[in-house]
């Protein structure tokens, strides 16, 4: 008897919360939000989004704090323990593990059980899951891939490559024309992590890549060596710009703008500065990183930015309502539009902006990435392993002969860290 | 019969309070108290906390786990730590070049020409601007594609060198950038020191036929000893504190070849990929011991000086 009642009550509750996602009852009380979206465009987008939430709930007292993106990465440790907000931004996958393990993030599996979220956000569920529970919701993600100078490809008569052989043949033609194939700036290391991600996923597949970043495979494994051997082919050709270890990713952009280098393996956020620097529609295009080993399925990097509820939050019901609002199809369409974040919506029911790059990226991630979607090297691997490994990648790109030394060092680090 | 002097025994003497009785001894301590308290809480106490923390494994969030000396054992085999230690040594030695350089600029500027104040302030300028700006200026100066250095080298037909991209050169490149403001600092110290040089001694030496190098070495420099001492202290401490230039110019790279202890500690304990508080504390303890060596020497020589007077 009582269990039936409970069941009925639960059904009513679930029903009402699902209903709340669309047209919620006006909320009251407080809601404090901490954001790391300090760059101008994301900042405006978030402020606009919170403004709309406020309009829906005029009696809700919302307090928003925007913290510098880099400073946020260290401050989050303090505010999660000391004076927790009700909602905070962060990143998916292993990047949230320290806070999950320390019990500082709220388990929001209940949100993911709601049909609206369960059905429409399935693609990012894996990235939000640790220990079979979900610890937050995504609000945006973006594709990685090769952005290239379409006009130079046309001038040299090159096509978008799809295989490793074509990629290398293209690159040889580009080098013969007195240019470099790829620009890159490895001063802050993570850009080299992008190259490793793709080369390793294409050489050994998504599952192997995940096993490696989880510390289950030795770095001195022959399969890892094969990845580096492929990488070395490009390095020995002189495919990368010289002295990349002295540039940040932004400082590497001018090489592509001036045409000294023709392509850039990057996240979609590189498109805006490239266009601002004067590259037009017919000069800039995108292709998916080529296949290397035909036996493995293609998989992609698509870093996801997320919202979480700190375990010490005071207004968790309001926070849950806010999270539902953030991931709703309508809001996802608005905040990921070309005039806002200019990235991909996480909700399958929302529409992608008309932008050429976003359309291609959405197409690629939804239909041509059967292997899986990785976050990014420094989000999939634990922070400490990531920093040692990415330093190794940078060294390898400058002194490929040091490979044995680098790999044994990484293996040592792996044994200590995991 | 002698009469004892009349003592007014009936006059009431109020008992003096404890404070009144001890006023002379207590007052200095009262004046010192705020300083001592702050020094205890913000300097001495954290030093011992660091010592303690270096025996733990702690990520700054969860429970700290006692690991004994294992952090130090790991340091002994950590090649990045070894590199940092050597780089610290390079900084210590090469940074001292700021002292002779500062002295010679000071001697050069110590003359009465129209507008000398302007020249002096121009030479002092690099010390006034922020280290971050110095770092940025030198990064552009060294830039392999458009930097001034390589343009100049190009005139002599020398190939472009990426100073900050070359693991063998990068540290020297950063030290050179650091010397620019540090030389200016030493110069100011010597300029004030030169004002205090006794003209009579110079005159007397001149009558005895001293000039040029001998004059400088035997007459001027001994009189500049206090300035040299201070210049030495600030330069050594400056070298051990070097952090901002490295952070701006190379961020510790290429592949960690320009790290020094303070930067390595920051990376391990506080940066985006760090949060190994115990390990960071162990590095800090090593740095502290090195600094302690110098500081003890400075204190000792100052104490000797005081007693000599």
Image (spheres, coloured by chain):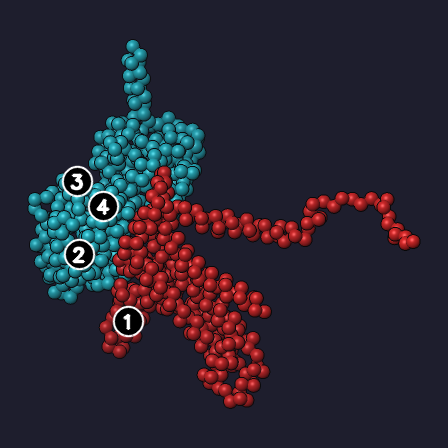
Q: Tell me the element at label 1.
A: helix
| Residue at the spot 49% in from the left edge and 77% down from the top edge | B221
Which of the two discs, 3 and 2, labels the residue nearer the N terminus? 3
A287 or A385, which lies in front? A385
Query: Do discs 3 and 4 share a chain?
Result: yes
Give the CA distance from mark 3 to mark 4: 27 Å
Name the tint of chain B in the rendering.
red
Chain bearing tag 3 is A
- Residue B186 lies, with reference to residue A129, above or below; the image says below
Chain bearing tag 2 is A
Q: Which residue is mark 3?
A: A372
| Residue at the spot 71% in from the left edge and 48% down from the top edge | B20
- Mark 4 or 2: the one toward you: 4
| Residue at the spot 50% in from the left edge and 48% down from the top edge | B41
Which of the two discs, 3 and 4, labels the residue nearer the N terminus? 3
Chain bearing tag 4 is A
A411 or A211, which lies in front? A411
Mark 1: few, some, or many residues within 10 Å (few <14, many ≥20)?
A: many
Q: Which residue is mark 1?
A: B150
Q: Which residue is mark 2?
A: A403
- Quadrant of the image for the N terminus of chain A? top left
Give the CA distance from mark 3 to mark 1: 46 Å
Mark 2: few, some, or many residues within 10 Å (few <14, many ≥20)?
A: many
- Residue A401 lies, with reference to residue A65, above or below; the image says below
On the rendered structure, is B159 left or right of A20?
A: left
- Mark 3 or 4: the one toward you: 4
Q: Are marks 3 and 4 in contact (CB under 8 Å)?
A: no
């Amino acid at each position: 008897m009582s269990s039936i009642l409970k069941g009925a009550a639960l059904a009513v509750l679930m029903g009402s919360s699902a209903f709340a996602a669309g047209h919620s009852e006006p909320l009251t009380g407080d809601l404090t939000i901490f954001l790391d979206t300090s760059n101008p465009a994301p900042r405006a987008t978030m402020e606009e989004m919170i403004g709309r939430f406020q309009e829906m709930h005029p009696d809700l007292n919302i307090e928003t704090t925007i913290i510098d993106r880099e400073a946020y990465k260290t401050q989050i440790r303090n505010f999660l323990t000391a004076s927790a907000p009700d909602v905070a931004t962060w990143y998916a996958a292993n990047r949230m593990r320290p806070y999950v393990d320390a019990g500082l993030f709220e388990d929001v599996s209940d949100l993911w059980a709601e049909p609206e979220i369960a059905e429409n956000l399935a693609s990012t569920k894996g990235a939000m899951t640790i220990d079979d529970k979900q610890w937050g919701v995504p609000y945006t993600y973006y594709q990685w891939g090769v952005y290239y100078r379409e006009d130079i490809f046309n001038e040299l008569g090159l096509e978008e490559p799809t295989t490793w052989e074509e990629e290398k043949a293209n690159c040889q033609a580009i080098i013969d024309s007195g240019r470099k194939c790829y620009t890159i700036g490895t001063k802050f290391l993570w850009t080299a992590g992008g190259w490793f991600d793709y080369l390793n996923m294409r050489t050994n597949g998504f599952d192997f890549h995940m096993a490696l970043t989880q510390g289950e495979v030795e770095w001195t494994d022959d399969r890892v060596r094969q990845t580096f051997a492929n990488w070395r082919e490009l390095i020995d050709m002189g495919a990368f710009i010289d002295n990349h270890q002295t540039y940040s990713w932004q400082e590497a952009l001018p090489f592509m703008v001036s045409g000294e280098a023709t392509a850039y393996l990057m996240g979609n956020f590189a498109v805006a500065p490239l266009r601002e620097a004067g590259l037009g529609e017919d000069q800039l295009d995108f292709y998916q990183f080529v296949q290397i080993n035909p036996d493995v399925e293609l998989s992609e990097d698509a870093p996801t930015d997320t919202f979480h509820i700190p375990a010490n939050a005071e207004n968790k019901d309001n926070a849950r309502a806010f999270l539902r609002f953030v991931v709703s199809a309508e809001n996802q369409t608005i905040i990921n539009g070309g005039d806002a974040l200019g990235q991909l919506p996480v909700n399958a029911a929302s529409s992608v902006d008309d932008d050429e790059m976003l359309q291609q990226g959405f197409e690629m991630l939804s239909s041509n990435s059967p292997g899986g979607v990785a976050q990014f090297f420094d989000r999939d691997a634990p922070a400490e392993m990531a920093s040692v490994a990415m330093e190794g990648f940078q060294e390898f790109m400058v002194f490929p002969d040091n490979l044995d030394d680098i790999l044994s060092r990484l293996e040592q680090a792996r044994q200590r860290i995991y | 019969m002698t009469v004892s002097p009349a003592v007014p025994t009936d006059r009431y003497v109020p008992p003096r309070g404890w404070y009144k009785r001890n006023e002379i001894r207590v007052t200095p301590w009262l004046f010192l108290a705020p300083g001592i308290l702050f020094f205890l809480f913000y300097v001495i106490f954290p030093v011992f906390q660091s010592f303690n923390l270096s025996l733990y494994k702690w990520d700054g969030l969860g429970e700290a786990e006692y690991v004994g000396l294992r952090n130090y054992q790991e340091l002994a085999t950590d090649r990045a730590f070894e590199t940092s230690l050597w780089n610290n040594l390079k900084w210590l030695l090469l940074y001292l070049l700021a002292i002779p350089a500062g002295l010679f600029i000071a001697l050069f500027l110590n003359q009465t020409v129209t507008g000398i104040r302007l020249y002096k302030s121009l030479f002092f300028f690099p010390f006034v601007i922020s280290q971050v700006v110095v770092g940025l200026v030198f990064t552009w100066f060294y830039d392999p594609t458009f930097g001034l250095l390589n343009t100049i080298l190009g005139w002599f037909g020398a190939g472009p060198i990426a100073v900050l991209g070359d693991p063998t050169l990068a540290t020297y490149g950063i030290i050179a950038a650091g010397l620019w403001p540090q030389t200016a600092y030493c110069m100011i110290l010597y300029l004030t020191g030169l004002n205090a040089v006794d003209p009579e001694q110079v005159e007397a030496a001149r009558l005895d036929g001293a000039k040029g190098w001998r004059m400088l070495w035997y007459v001027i420099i001994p009189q500049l000893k206090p300035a040299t001492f201070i210049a030495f202290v600030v330069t050594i401490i400056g070298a051990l504190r070097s952090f901002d230039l490295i952070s701006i110019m190379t961020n510790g790279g290429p592949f960690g070849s320009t790290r020094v202890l303070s930067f390595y500690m920051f990376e391990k304990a506080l940066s985006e990929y760090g949060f190994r508080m115990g390990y960071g504390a162990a590095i800090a303890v090593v740095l502290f011991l090195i600094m302690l060596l110098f500081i003890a020497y400075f204190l000792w020589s100052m104490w000797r000086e005081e007693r000599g007077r």
